[in-house]
Image: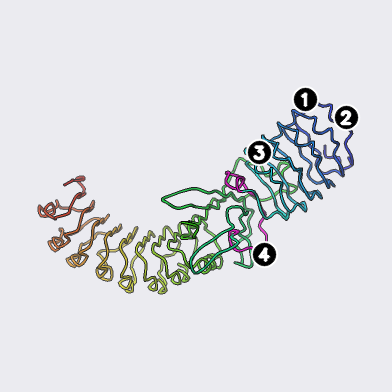
């Protein structure tokens, strides 16, 4: 009923025992009768754009309710027992002066969507945040004291962090960065926590949902739906932030990215994948504790000179189509153990790489015909060598000096492996066009 003239509902509405949907948006309703709790079959209740200041406690008796929209009212608090709505899947609280949710909110185990745009809510129960919910906040630029990602305490010296498990993601603080994207967007954020490879990972994700109709009663105005998928992962170990992963943010604001790198200067692991940055951020060079750096499918992969300051770097992965060179200063990354270069146009191994004495794993994929230089013997600590390219020359005999080599993969080798390959003291596996041979 969208007449715009309804101010109150009669008590007799509670007699509609079979009612499943009640839509009363865009009216002037100031109060709801207690009898509304008698609508035991009600599944959808829409009351957006009214003049409600309170919600009767009896609403928590609606055991079959799965959609509740009370957006655009004057409601300051929710019923204490709202957690009794066990079948509730979506709740809209937007545009109300609500500052907090009751403790029982944590009992809404089937909740999938929460809409809190233009409320004063800064915290949600941990149990709710750990669910795979769709958390909607319209993109805003308000000055906010909250640090990035809702972290309340962070030590830049040791990486210790707290306050993140029970706080809503806040990606929009001008205190921290101008904004996440270079253009305004409507974001639909979910916050998930998971385990992977010994890390606790807090994941902020924007998921597209093309089947969801944005012109339904959930919204007062038609909005443009952002059909992009991205995620930002924060990696924890023993309560410390040790890594950041940025995936699929094609129009990220470079100021935001640089600010994140500056703020979390203690991290040991950084991944940038499918990012629309015009250049690799120079701020990466300030991450003096960085041990693993992964750059995949970036728009531009020209290495800033600041990367030569990464004295502790052990693992370096770069996959970028058309990578035609590595800087001379890569030889100064003396702790480098793993180097993975994909989609290059190299025709041989750059000399600067051949001086990395601690290199244990070297992988290179080239789109060109490739020559293995005799100087490869300098990589005496090498355990794994993979060259995914058409090999134009024979395997140089100087490779006999690679006594630690365990795995050799030369799929593009035109010739057979020489017999002496099998005599290398630690060799376990060799791969060529003909297949893989084990020793």
Indicate whether residue 133 is drawn in magenta: yes
Q: CA distance from mark 1 to mark 3?
A: 20 Å
Give how far across and how far down residue 417 sits, in percent. Answer: 14, 52
* Mark 3 lies on residue: 89
Tell me if mark 2 has few (under 14), some (14-19) or many (20+) residues whose alpha carbon lies within 10 angstroms of its own. few
Q: Earlier in the sequence, mark 3 or mark 2?
A: 2
- In the picture provided, is 169 more to the left or to the right than 344? right
Q: CA distance from mark 1 to mark 2?
A: 13 Å
Nearest to the observer: residue 108 or residue 160: 160
Badges 3 and 2: C-beta atoms under 8 Å apart?
Answer: no
Task: Point out the stretch of residues depicted in magenta.
Answer: 126-150
Badges 1 and 2: C-beta atoms under 8 Å apart?
Answer: no
Looking at the rendered structure, the secondary structure element under dot 1 is: loop
Q: CA distance from mark 4 to mark 1?
A: 47 Å
Badges 1 and 3: C-beta atoms under 8 Å apart?
Answer: no
Q: CA distance from mark 4 to mark 2?
A: 47 Å
* Mark 1 lies on residue: 18
Residue 398 is labelled as none
Residue 12 is labelled as 2
Looking at the rendered structure, the secondary structure element under dot 2 is: helix
């Amino acid at each position: 009923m969208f007449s715009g003239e309804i101010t109150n509902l009669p008590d007799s509405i509670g007699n509609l025992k079979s009612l499943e949907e009640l839509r009363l948006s865009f009216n002037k309703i100031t109060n709801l009768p207690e009898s509304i709790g008698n609508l035991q079959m009600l599944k959808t209740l829409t009351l957006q754009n009214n003049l409600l200041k309170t919600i009767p406690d009896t609403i928590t008796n609606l055991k079959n309710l799965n959609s509740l929209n009370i957006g655009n009212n004057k409601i300051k608090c929710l019923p204490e027992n709202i957690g009794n709505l066990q079948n509730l899947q979506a709740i809209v609280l937007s545009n109300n002066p609500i500052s907090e949710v009751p403790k029982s909110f944590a009992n809404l185990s089937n909740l999938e969507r929460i809409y809190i745009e233009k409320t004063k809510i800064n915290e949600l129960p941990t149990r709710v945040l750990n669910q795979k919910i769709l958390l909607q906040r319209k993109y805003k630029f308000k000055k906010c004291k909250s640090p990035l990602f809702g972290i309340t305490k962070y030590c830049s010296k040791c990486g210790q962090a707290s306050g993140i498990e029970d706080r809503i993601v806040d990606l929009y603080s001008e205190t921290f960065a101008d904004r996440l994207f270079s253009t305004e967007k409507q974001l639909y954020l979910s916050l998930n926590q998971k385990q992977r490879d010994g890390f606790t990972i807090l994941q902020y994700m924007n998921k597209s949902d093309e089947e969801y109709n944005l012109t339904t009663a959930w919204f007062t105005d038609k909005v443009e739906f952002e059909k992009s998928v991205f995620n930002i992962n924060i990696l924890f170990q023993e309560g410390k932030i040790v890594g950041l992963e940025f995936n699929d943010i094609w129009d990220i604001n470079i100021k935001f990215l640089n600010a994140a790198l500056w703020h979390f200067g203690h991290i040991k692991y950084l991944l940038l994948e499918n990012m629309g940055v015009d250049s690799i951020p120079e701020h990466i060079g300030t991450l003096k504790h960085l041990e693993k750096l992964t750059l995949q499918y970036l728009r531009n992969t020209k290495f800033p000179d600041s990367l030569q300051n990464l004295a502790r770097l052990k693992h370096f992965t770069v996959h970028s189509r058309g990578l035609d060179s590595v800087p001379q200063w890569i030889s100064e990354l003396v702790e480098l153990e793993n180097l993975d270069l994909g989609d290059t146009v190299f025709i041989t191994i750059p000399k600067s790489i051949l001086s990395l004495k601690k290199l244990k794993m070297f992988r290179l994929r080239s789109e060109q015909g490739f020559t293995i230089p005799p100087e490869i013997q300098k990589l005496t600590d090498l355990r794994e060598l993979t060259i995914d390219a058409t090999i134009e020359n024979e395997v140089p005999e100087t490779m006999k000096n690679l006594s630690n080599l365990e795995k050799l993969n030369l799929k593009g080798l035109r010739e057979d492996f020489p017999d002496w390959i099998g005599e290398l003291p630690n060799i376990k596996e060799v791969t060529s066009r003909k297949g893989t041979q084990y020793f």
